[in-house]
């Protein structure tokens, strides 16, 4: 029989939480283990020449306890009742069964209950024989309906457990650790708060240990172990394999070691090579096999977009160029490439800022059509609806115990359903500052945990924020009486007569001031980086192009709806153009509103009074305005 390594020497390679438990067995009778309970964990090899091992929590605990002279591990859960480990058909399994009978008597197949659990715990914690055994209470979070509102039987049970933690007796045995050690009760809970708070508060006999998720070093070592599944026995002698393992470990950020094992199985099933494991990680995280970013025609579509997008978003050459550069970076998978870990970040992040009506939303639609072939494929959130502190629950779902918890969040549900999409957060400055904090994890790590505890990944999404920040800045009014505080007011920060460089500098400065001074969230600004895209005012030349485009849309709609050929004579058209492009402070949206007021409304009134004949040609010969009433002369 091969002996496991002795933990008393604090050998490297054992997880820290195991070493903590092992070192305190002489002073604590109960432990509350929470966190990453259902993972696999790295353990040292059985002998110095072998590889490290990946063990589930129960096996890891048994290896730890066995080296300290424990004879068996008893596991109790509300479904299966009592189980004795190890349950192998060998000498160790026989010894474990005999030790359990010495502690508990003849084992019976009894129905799980709090009464039976009480008796078992008492027999282990206060043994009548010198038998070292540990008692695991699995799924302990499910014992009480709520930890703060206990039923009478539940309250009595936890009172007994609290008393038992103080009345437990340590056990001496001959062997590696002859000094007295407690037979520990190990509670496995999802969160420490799942047990009554009065049970653990100021109780030095109960130790709370949180099991963390694996860090990069653990994932790298695990990747090297899993490389054996691809025929690589010694990664150290294969530079390409070592590089692939490191890439696998970085891409697996946020995953457990058990998930890495499952990714390897998925890769083997799909005949994926070791070098292509990141693709298997993406499939495992997102649950989809198709990757739109890897389609060959996407690069061609983006190249074509250099001509098509400026025709759609008029008068914004600088904004369109910078946006397409960021999109090209996203298509090539180079977003955040300068960072140590960039694979899990969103494909692209854009912050559109500038005057209203200049094409920010239109450019978001154009990007969506370029990538996904349908401009309606983007997901839009009007952030003015999230101005309340509690409105963030709509995005990620209500926390446990609140109404609607089971439904999840609008954002997390949508991304889980389709992770390949453009997500538009319109007028982001109107959202509550606490809601903005939720974007920190998305921008940095590319993931978000919803109210149900499920992790949603944004690594294949493009995030677009729009804002009107920078149009106005706060000023102080001069007051007549010096004893009165000056009242804050807004002054225009940018004007149409400024050149683009000045507009860009002022808006970027205002955006930085808003996140740094007003919201006190400079970390959000840092994560946006240089992805702030500034839109300029609509100038006269761009306004005329927008007018012609929107006017053509009206004529086409009339032809589609009524099969009429609509024309406007030169003088009437020039008058209409001057009316619609005379005031550009509202941008392209203002031109459309003017067209609706000065042309669509009087046209609808005139057509409503006529008997429409298909294929008829209707010509607007003149246009008149008296006050707010506009009329057309039709031929």
Image (spheres, rainbow, N blue to C red):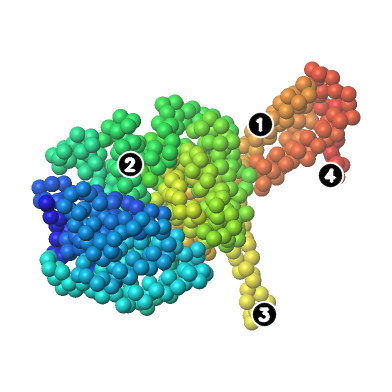
- Circle on res. 549: 1
Distance between mark 1 and mark 2 Cα atoms: 54 Å
Residue receiving disc 4: 628
In the displayed structure, 417 sits above or below 426; it is above
Label 1: how many residues lie within 10 Å, few (<14), some (14-19) or many (20+)? Answer: some
Measure how far apart labels 3 and 2 are at the Cα level. 73 Å
Could one spot residue 306 in this view of the protein?
A: no
Label ID, residue 157: none
Q: Which mark is residue 481?
A: 3
Going 86% across and 45% down the picture, which residue do you hit? 627
Disc on the earlier residue, 3 or 1 = 3
Answer with the quarter of the image where residue 604 lies: top right
Residue bearing mark 2: 262
Answer with left or right where residue 136 lies relative to residue 587: left
Spatial distance from mark 3 to mark 4, Cα to Cα?
Answer: 44 Å
- Residue 494 lies left or right of residue 181; in this view the side is right
Q: Which residue occupies 46% across, 54% down?
A: 453
Task: Please provide percent x and percent y for residue 634.
Answer: 85, 27
x%, y% of residue 444?
A: 40, 52
State which tag comes first along the sequence, 3 or 2. Answer: 2
> Callout 4 environment at 10 Å: few (<14), some (14 to 19), or many (20+)?
few
* Secondary structure type for disc 3: loop
Q: Is residue 163 above or below residue 93?
A: below
Q: Work out whether mark 2 precedes mark 4 in sequence or the reverse, and give the earlier one.
A: 2
């Amino acid at each position: 029989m091969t002996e496991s390594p002795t933990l008393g020497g604090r050998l490297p390679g054992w997880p820290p939480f195991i070493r903590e438990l092992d070192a305190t067995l002489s002073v604590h009778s109960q432990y509350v283990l929470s966190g990453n309970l259902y993972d696999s964990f790295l353990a040292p090899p059985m002998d110095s020449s072998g590889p490290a091992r990946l063990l589930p929590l129960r096996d890891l605990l048994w290896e730890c306890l066995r080296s300290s002279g424990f004879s068996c591990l008893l596991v109790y859960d509300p479904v299966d009742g009592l189980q004795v480990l190890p349950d192998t058909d060998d000498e160790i399994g026989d010894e474990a069964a005999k030790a359990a009978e010495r502690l508990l008597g003849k084992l019976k197949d009894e129905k799980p209950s709090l009464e039976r659990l009480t008796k078992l715990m008492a027999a282990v914690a206060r043994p009548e024989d010198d038998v070292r055994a540990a008692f695991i209470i699995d799924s302990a979070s499910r014992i009480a309906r709520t930890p703060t509102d206990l039923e009478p039987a539940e309250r009595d049970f936890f009172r007994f457990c609290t008393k038992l933690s103080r009345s437990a007796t340590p056990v001496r045995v001959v062997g590696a650790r002859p000094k007295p050690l407690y037979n520990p009760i190990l509670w496995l809970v999802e969160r420490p708060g799942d047990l009554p708070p009065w049970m653990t508060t100021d109780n030095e006999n109960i130790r709370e240990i949180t099991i963390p998720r694996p860090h990069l070093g653990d994932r790298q070592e695990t990747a090297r172990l899993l490389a054996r599944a691809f025929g690589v026995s010694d990664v150290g002698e294969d530079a390409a394999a070592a590089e692939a393992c490191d890439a696998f470990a970085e891409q697996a950020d946020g995953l457990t070691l058990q998930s890495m094992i499952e990714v390897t199985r998925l890769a083997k099933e799909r005949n994926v090579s070791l070098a292509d494991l990141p693709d298997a990680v993406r499939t495992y995280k997102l649950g989809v096999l198709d990757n739109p970013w890897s389609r060959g025609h996407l690069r061609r579509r983006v190249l074509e977009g250099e001509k098509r997008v400026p025709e759609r978003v008029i008068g914004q050459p600088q904004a369109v160029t910078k946006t397409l550069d960021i999109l090209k970076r996203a298509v090539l998978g180079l977003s955040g490439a300068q960072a140590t870990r960039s694979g899990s970040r969103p494909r692209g992040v854009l912050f559109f800022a500038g005057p209203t009506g200049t094409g920010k939303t239109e450019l978001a639609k154009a990007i969506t059509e370029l990538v996904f072939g349908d401009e309606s494929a983007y997901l839009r959130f009007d952030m003015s609806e999230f101005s309340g502190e509690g409105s963030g629950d709509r995005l990620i779902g209500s926390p446990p115990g609140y109404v609607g918890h089971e439904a999840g969040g609008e954002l997390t549900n949508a991304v889980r359903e389709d992770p390949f999409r453009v997500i538009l957060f319109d007028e982001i400055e109107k959202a509550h500052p606490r809601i903005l904090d939720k974007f920190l994890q998305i921008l940095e790590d590319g993931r978000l945990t919803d109210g149900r505890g499920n992790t949603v990944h944004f690594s294949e999404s493009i995030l677009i924020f729009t804002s009107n920040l920078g149009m106005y800045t706060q000023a102080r009014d001069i007051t007549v009486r010096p004893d009165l505080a000056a009242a804050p007011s807004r002054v225009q920060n940018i004007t149409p007569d400024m050149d683009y460089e000045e507009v860009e500098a002022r808006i970027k400065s205002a955006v930085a001031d808003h996140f740094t001074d007003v919201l006190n969230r400079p970390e959000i600004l840092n994560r946006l980086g240089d992805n702030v895209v500034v839109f300029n005012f609509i100038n006269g030349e761009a306004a005329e192009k927008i007018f012609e485009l929107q006017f053509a849309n009206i004529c086409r709609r009339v032809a589609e709806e009524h099969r009429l050929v609509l024309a406007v004579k030169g003088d009437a058209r020039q008058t209409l153009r001057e009316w619609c492009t005379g005031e550009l402070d509202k941008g392209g949206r203002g031109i459309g509103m003017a067209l609706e007021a000065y042309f669509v409304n009087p046209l609808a009134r005139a057509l409503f009074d006529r008997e429409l004949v298909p294929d008829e040609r209707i010509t607007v010969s003149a246009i008149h305005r008296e006050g707010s009433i506009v009329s057309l002369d039709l031929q």
